[in-house]
Image: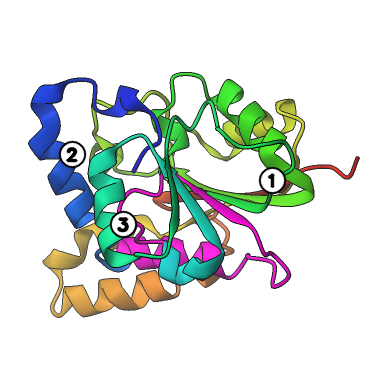
Amino acid sequence: MTATSAAFPSAGRHADIERHFARRGRGEDFDMEARWIARRLPMSASRILDIGCGNGALFPWIRASRVTGIDFAQAGLRQTRTCQPAARLACGDGSSLPFADNSFDVITAQHVIEHLPDAGTALAQWRRVLRPGGTLLVVTPNARFVDPSVFDDPTHRQLFDRRELNSLMQKSGLIVNRVCTIGIPSIRKYHAIPSGWRFRRTILRRAEWLSIVPGLRDSGQSLCCMARKPLE
């Protein structure tokens, strides 16, 4: 999922775009990340922006009636409209948001920032449209995951580790509440053990608990960050 046209640069990849959005939101990996996001949504939040919303797969996790979705790809937005006919949607670039300052209580960006040509410029925009004290929730591939081949994607511009993402957030004027990884390396070898798929599902459902174990804090497949805009 991405909010910039750089991710799919040619019209010849139209079929790839359609397949990308058709698959989005399926599987335990997605659910693991969506749970992390849902658990950190302030109960008082009434205006939520999902950047790179794709087919709207995250909407049910973040209470769709309160969400505005933006994506560069009409293919994803068409699918969102089908599944969420009442959703507020916009077609646009995640690095140049068509919203007024201080418009949202929360911004979610799941697998977006790694696709952007200038993550710092994008974060400045995200900070701009957040209200003072508002929350930013980012999920992206972890550059220190033991098997980086699972992230092979020609549309990726940069993968971050915990230190790099924390530094980028701070340079963008955001206050970082938490940066962590979820998921552990061994789940990628689930097919090699009896009932491995069941083991993998169990591990992913407990991924957040396991992320606090020494030695696993930096190695999960997904890098998650919770930050907020300072009170002004």
Which region shows up in magenta?
29-58
Checking the image for residue 115, the label placed there is none
Label 3 residue SS: helix
Q: Which residue is mark 3?
A: 80
Label 1 residue SS: loop
- Name the amino acid, label 2: Ile
- Nearest the viewer among 166 and 71 is 71
Relative to 215, say whether 115 is above or below. above
Earlier residue among tags 1 and 3: 3
Q: Which residue is mark 2?
A: 17
- Name the amino acid, label 1: Ser
- Nearest the viewer among 144 and 67 is 67
Residue at 59% from the left image edge and 21% from the top image edge: 121
Q: Position of residue 179 (x, y in %)?
A: 62, 49
Q: Report whether residue 167 is seen.
A: yes
Q: Residues within 10 Å of mark 1 (few under 14, many from 20)?
A: some
